[in-house]
Amino acid sequence: MAFMVTAQAIPILSDNYAWLLRDEPSGATAVVDPADAAAVSRAIDAAGGRLDLILLTHHHDDHIAGVNAVRARYGARVVGAAADARRLPKLDVAVREGDTVTLGGAEGQVIDTPGHTIGHISFYFPNGHVLLCADTLFSLGCGRLLEGTPADMFASLRKLAALPPDTLVCCGHEYTESNARFAVHADPDNVALAAFAAGVRAARQAGRPTVPSRLGDELAVNPFLRAPDVAALAKLRAAKDTF
């Protein structure tokens, strides 16, 4: 399968990322969670000024605040979770797990990933191995359980862990350096983690983003993905919340 979809991180707000997706053969583009309309619009214009879709993962303001302004400027259709439509900007397409989203010649799969919020969804584009997981899965971490339960998050992470190992984890925040400190504390004997954390520190010292990461690497170093059961995940998440 030819890789068709590319993902470009757009740094916004204090530590968020929106993501600009492009189906290379058709030139169709989408943006994920455009909370900062000005910054996102600059990135879209620099890439050619075309926007077909706005994909929303969950309802928090630091993911949706710029949606209406970006929609008005480019005429893009807004896609989000049917189950959370009342908390999202007006949706043109309401989706559920198992639905697909068409971007040019590529299709993205909708995955329910509750835990951080009840209505959180992720998008996975096989033609590019691109996962847009926002605040469910971070590099070396997972989202706080603001609405869901440890069981919700464990099930969500199991779904994502089953994707191909070369999947690009395109998350919603630059949290990796702080996540690394906790991960090393929680799993001090993990040699792969120690090396990964050193790379994270070097990247941040050089002003480079740490994402996207590879899912295969995360499976070896991310303590939340490595948690064997719900109880272990719950213990890790509680420890991280007070670390």
Image: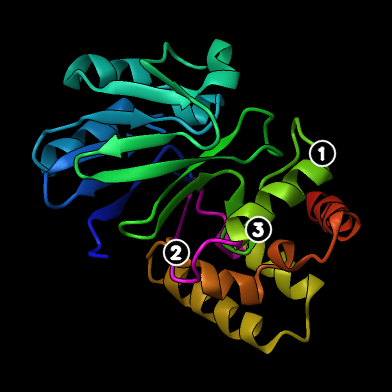
Label 3 SS: strand
- Would you say the magenta stretch is mainly helix, strand or loop? loop
| Residue 195, percent from left and from top | 58, 85
Q: Identify whether 108 is placed above or below 218.
A: above
Highlighted magenta segment, given as a residue range: 162-177
Q: How far apart are marks 2 and 3 (CA)?
A: 16 Å
Quadrant of the image occupied by residue 73:
top left
| Residue 107, percent from left and from top | 32, 44
Question: Mark number for residue 141?
Answer: 3
Question: Mark number for residue 167?
Answer: 2
Query: Tag 2: residue type?
Result: Thr
Query: Tag 1: residue type?
Result: Thr
Residue at the spot 50% in from the left edge and 79% down from the top edge:
199
Q: Distance between the residues labelled 2 and 1?
A: 26 Å
Mark 3 / mark 1, whichever is N-terminal? 3
- Left or right of 112: which side holds 38? left
Question: Mark number for residue 149?
Answer: 1
